[in-house]
Amino acid sequence: MASVRIRMRSCVFSVLLLNIFCSFVSSLYFHIGETEKKCFIEEIPDETMIIGNYRTQLYDKQREEYMPATQGLGMFVEVKDPDDKVILSRQYGSEGRFTFTSHTPGEHQICLHSNSSKFALFAGGMLRVHLDIQVGEHANNYAEIAAKDKLTELQLRVRQLVEQVDQIQKEQNYQRYREERFRQTSESTNQRVLWWSIVQTLILVAIGIWQMRHLKSFFEAKKLV
């Protein structure tokens, strides 16, 4: 019975780690028009490096498929932190990579749009953008690190594990930060509801007293009391 519990706990822990690691990498593609702008929200802990790789494709009506975009087409990338402060604003080519480091935990907004001055390149068609976002230690190129620092396979593996643990710790700190903000919001909402209930009660009491005084003066004027 004890061995079964241990196995179940190890399975749950493995699934949790898998979910955490998968959340650090996201890959997708989307379509945009000439002047259209696409934005994505990424929840990122503080002091975390993010690398985004993208490539663009234009729809070829003759071949009826998407082909690699020409070099004249560019993509404009803008990144804002949770305080709506711009931390990256730059124009790249039809295929490229952008990098930034978060300094504030929370939701970061990543926006992309094409350079709309090249109208002839679109010709009314749609542009397909393949975007791959890597967060934390997944953004590191360990092959280059091993070659640069002359690390053995064991040393490289230990470094990967250390950085993975560091990223998990950052994610846990971010979850605590979110929990604290949620608790503060809940307490603030409860306090406002309490004060609103007190104000409503005082208003009802004041209206009741006023109605009683008004009725008393009315009856006294009519000499009914």
Image: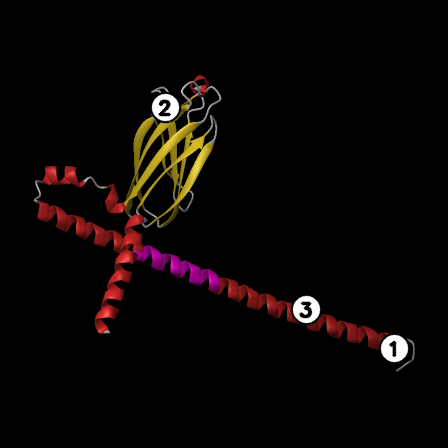
Q: Which x, y percent locates residue 40?
A: 41, 41
Indicate whether 83 appears above or below 168: above
Q: Earlier in the sequence, mark 2 or mark 1?
A: 2
Give coordinates of residue 31: x percent, y percent: 43, 32
Indicate the position of residue 128 as horizontal and vertical percent values. Answer: 40, 30
Mark 1 or mark 3: which comes first in sequence? Answer: 3
Q: Which mark is residue 67?
A: 2
Please give the name of the residue rendered at 41% of the width and 58% of the height, measured from the top-left corner: 181
- Which quarter of the rendering shows the N terminus? bottom left
Quadrant in which the C terminus appears: bottom right
- Distance, label 1 to label 3, CA atoms, is 24 Å
* Amino acid type of the residue tagged 3 in the rendering: Ile
Residue 175 is left or right of residue 123, and the answer is left
Residue 112 occupies quadrant: top left
Tell me the distance, in whole angstroms, between the alpha carbons under discs 2 and 1.
90 Å
Residue underneath mark 1: 219
Location of residue 169 by image quarter: bottom left
Question: What's the magenta region?
Answer: 172-186
Q: Which residue is mark 3?
A: 203
| Amino acid on which the number 1 mark rests in the picture | Phe
Residue at the (49%, 63%) spot, across then down: 188
Of residue 146 and residue 68, the one placed in the foreground of this image is: 68
Task: Name the main secondary structure of what is drawn in magenta.
Answer: helix
Secondary structure beneath dot 3 equals helix
Mark 2: amino acid: Met
